Amino acid sequence: MNAVWSAHQVRRVVAGLGARVVASLEANVLSPISGRIGEELRVYWAQDDFAGIAALIGGSAEAYARADASLARAADIVIAANPHVAGEHEAKGARPRTIPFGCDADHFAAAADCAPARDVIRRRPLAVFMGHLGDRIDVTLLERLVHDGVGLLLVGPRHFRADFARFDALLAHPSVQWVGEQAFDSLPGYLACADVGLVPYNHSRFNIGSFPLKTLEYLAAGLPVVSTSLPGVEWIGSEDITFADDPQSFSSAVRSVASAGRSAATDRRRRELAARHSWDARARDFACVMGITQAARHDGGALRRPLGRVGEP
């Protein structure tokens, strides 16, 4: 019912403008409006392994999987936000393009010039994790870091699915500082305090099918990154991301990267890479795949239709 009503609202607005819907970009799996608004081109952006995310957000994995497959079959173009998700759709007969999430590169690049957050106790080396503290994290990796003398800064709320006992023990360690959830505008100041950014995620089905956006945000702030070997992070292809999966290797990588230090050149290289993955860059990627050109905005919305069904080239 929500999808029907939303589609009705879109049609009313379009009619009021005297326009037509050239293309729809659908990312809502369970309540899609694509196919209901008279669009010429239907694009499905598969943002996650939706069957894998069901346990995290609630709902039936089977229902998510059926909806995901249905949208892909009906789409003219399938775009995947993660190489693993792209592979899943390829196995089902689609030929998806991979366009992950972008980052607000300019916002996080402000870490180079802003004052470090005042409530952070500066330690060296200091590693930062920015995000929800929950069951996506391999806590063993963080425990080994503090055991080996690495200061740990945690920025973000604790998720209700967290292992509270283990997190409580970790947070009680004198080398760990948890500042809780912070406003988006203040995040560069916290990254400015750190030497390395962390993506310490386990290899759950959801994590394998996700794109940890924080990786690009760390790089935009000039930080090197240590991450577990997740397809979305590996896709970025940066020399400033080090991969390690077991506690000893992860800790060794963090300490090695932090001790290597930073320079104006390395910070600039990381910021430039992040800028190539900005939301503006992603918008250009979408426009290219969808065949929407600059000229299309001046001739009544004409669309150069580049593709056939289900992402055919």
Image (cartoon, rainbow, N blue to C red):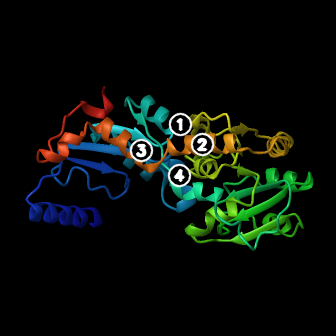
Rendered residue at 30%/33% (across/down): 310
Q: Residues within 10 Å of mark 2 (few under 14, many from 20)?
A: many
Q: Position of residue 218 (x, y in %)?
A: 64, 51
Mark 3 or mark 1: name the one nearer the start of the chain.
Answer: 1
In space, the residues marked 3 and 1 are separated at their CA atoms by 19 Å
Residue at image location 20% in from the left, 66% down from the top: 9
Crowding around mark 1 (Cα neighbors within 10 Å: few <14, some 14 to 19, many 20+) is: many
- Judging depth in this view, the residue of 41 and 59 nearest the camera is 41
Q: Specify the amino acid type for callout 2.
A: Ile
Residue at x-position 21% and y-position 49%: 35
Considering only vertical position in the picture, is 30 above or below 185?
A: above
Q: Residue furthest bottom?
A: 119
Q: Local crowd at mark 3 within 10 Å, few (<14), some, or many (≥20)? A: some
Q: Which mark is residue 208?
A: 2
Depth check, mark 3 against mark 4: the one in front is 4
- Which callout, 2 or 4, points to the residue nearer the camera? 4
Amino acid at dot 3 = Arg
Q: Nearer the viewer, mark 1 or mark 4?
A: 4
Q: CA distance from mark 3 to mark 2?
A: 21 Å
Mark 1 falls on what kind of element? Answer: helix
- Sooner in the amino-acid sequence: mark 3 or mark 2: 2
Closest to the observer, 131 or 50: 131
Query: In which quadrant of the rendered view does residue 122 lie?
Result: bottom right
> For mark 4, does the 10 Å Cα neighbourhood hold few (<14), some (14 to 19), or many (20 or more) residues?
many
Label 4 sits on residue:
105
The quadrant in which residue 107 appears is bottom right
